[in-house]
Image: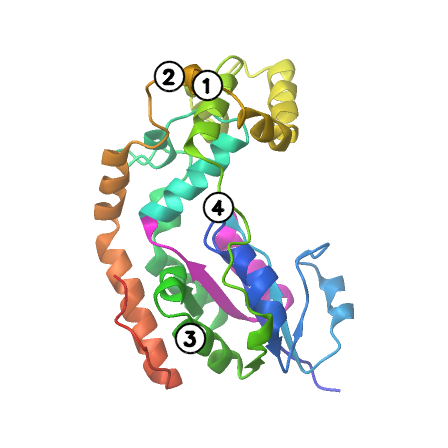
């Protein structure tokens, strides 16, 4: 029996990966989709292959470049990448850090001036990722942009199905959000509470390894405990009075605008990449590209 053709979705965290994994991929026909539950990028996962065409998915976040290499080494898969506009992705990812108890500010998440942020600028450069995929695998990645789904869902789904040469059961597709975002109030209060045990400076240093020499076992345990109880805390915080909030916004809008401007050329290039992809696939937009 010949080896199956495999595809692997490696999405940025907070770039609609869960939506694809729970709503879109299970609705595809003519292939075997292996759900992300209990799935790891390991050789032994090949035992689960039961069809001629296999689709797998695990978002990678900050380890997305390493994940490309690992997936190619084990599975030799064609890579699928899901994206969102840089400032939207950065803000959404930052919100996740806050939910998990981190207290550094958005400006410390992506540092546009010195690149000493929790996440590095090069890791958010999409064209760099595309080039890395092409170099490692010898194939162009299949690129999906979530803004396309919002503006023109048929184009988005047609692109995926044509690239994978598969069908889709549209009765199984749902346009409802898979994860509802926590409110600004919940996240602002979460950050305020977290600052009682972890300062923004310590939070930033903990994740960047810059200037922290006394991060004790006790502090590490506190942080782990706070991450584990995040879900419960976020539910309880909903009922807190607004008077508990300080005046600081969760996201500095000026910095978000600066992030969008910083990556503007990369965003245009990513869309040009998708336009060339759609031409090669013979897929036509119903509505103008939303950039």
282 relative to 291 in the view: left or right: right
Q: Nearer the viewer, mark 2 or mark 4?
A: 2
Most distant residue in the right direction: 47
Contact, CB < 8 Å: mark 1 with mark 4?
no
Marks 1 and 4 sit apart, C-alpha to C-alpha, by 26 Å
Q: Quadrant of the C terminus?
A: bottom left
The numbered mark, 2 or 4, whose residue comes first in the sequence reads 4
Contact, CB < 8 Å: mark 3 with mark 2?
no
The numbered mark, 3 or 4, whose residue comes first in the sequence reads 4
The residue pinned by badge 1 equals: 192
Q: Residue at x 39, y 84 (%)?
A: 281
Compared to residue 36, the image places residue 250 above or below, namely: above
The numbered mark, 3 or 2, whose residue comes first in the sequence reads 3
- Element type at marker 4? helix
Magenta-colored stretch includes residue 209: no
The residue pinned by badge 2 equals: 246
Could you tell me how many numbered marks the image carries? 4
| Quarter of image, res 129 | bottom left
Q: Is residue 212 visible?
A: no
Marks 1 and 2 sit apart, C-alpha to C-alpha, by 8 Å
The numbered mark, 1 or 2, whose residue comes first in the sequence reads 1
Pinpoint residue 278: horizontal percent, then vertical percent: 35, 79
How busy is the neighbourhood of tag 4: few (under 14 within 10 Å), some, or many (20 plus)? some
Which of the numbered marks, if any, corresponds to residue 62? 4
Instruction: Judge by depth and name the residue closer to the eye, 13 or 175.
Output: 175
Pinpoint residue 49: horizontal percent, then vertical percent: 73, 73
Marks 3 and 2 sit apart, C-alpha to C-alpha, by 43 Å
Q: Nearer the viewer, mark 1 or mark 3?
A: 3
Tell me which segment is drawn in magenta: 62-86
The residue pinned by badge 3 equals: 154
């Amino acid at each position: 029996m010949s080896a199956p053709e495999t595809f692997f979705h490696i999405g940025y965290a907070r770039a609609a990966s869960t939506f694809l994994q729970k709503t879109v991929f299970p609705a595809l026909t003519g292939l075997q989709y292996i759900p992300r539950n209990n799935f790891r990028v390991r050789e032994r996962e090949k035992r689960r292959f039961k069809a001629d065409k296999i689709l797998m998915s695990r978002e990678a976040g900050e380890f997305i470049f390493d994940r490309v290499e690992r997936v190619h080494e084990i599975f030799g898969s064609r890579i699928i990448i899901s994206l969102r506009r840089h400032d939207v992705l950065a803000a959404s990812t930052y919100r996740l850090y806050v939910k998990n108890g981190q207290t550094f500010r958005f400006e410390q998440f992506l540092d546009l001036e010195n690149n000493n942020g929790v996440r590095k600028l090069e890791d958010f450069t999409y064209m760099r990722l595309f080039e890395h995929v092409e170099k490692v695998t010898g194939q162009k990645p299949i690129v999906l942009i979530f803004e396309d789904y919002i503006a023109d869902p048929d184009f988005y789904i047609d692109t995926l199905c044509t690239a994978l040469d598969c069908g889709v059961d549209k009765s199984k597709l749902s346009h409802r959000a898979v994860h509802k975002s926590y409110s600004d109030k919940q996240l602002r209060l979460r950050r305020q509470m977290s600052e009682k045990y972890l300062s923004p400076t310590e939070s930033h240093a903990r994740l960047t390894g810059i200037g922290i020499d006394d991060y004790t076992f006790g502090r590490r345990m506190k942080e782990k405990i706070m991450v584990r109880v995040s879900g419960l805390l976020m539910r309880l915080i909903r009922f807190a009075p607004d008077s508990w909030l300080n005046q600081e916004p969760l996201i500095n809008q000026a910095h978000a605008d600066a992030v969008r401007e910083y990556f503007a050329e990369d965003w245009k290039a990513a869309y040009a990449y998708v336009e060339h992809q759609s031409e090669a696939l013979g897929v036509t937009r119903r509505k103008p590209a939303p950039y």
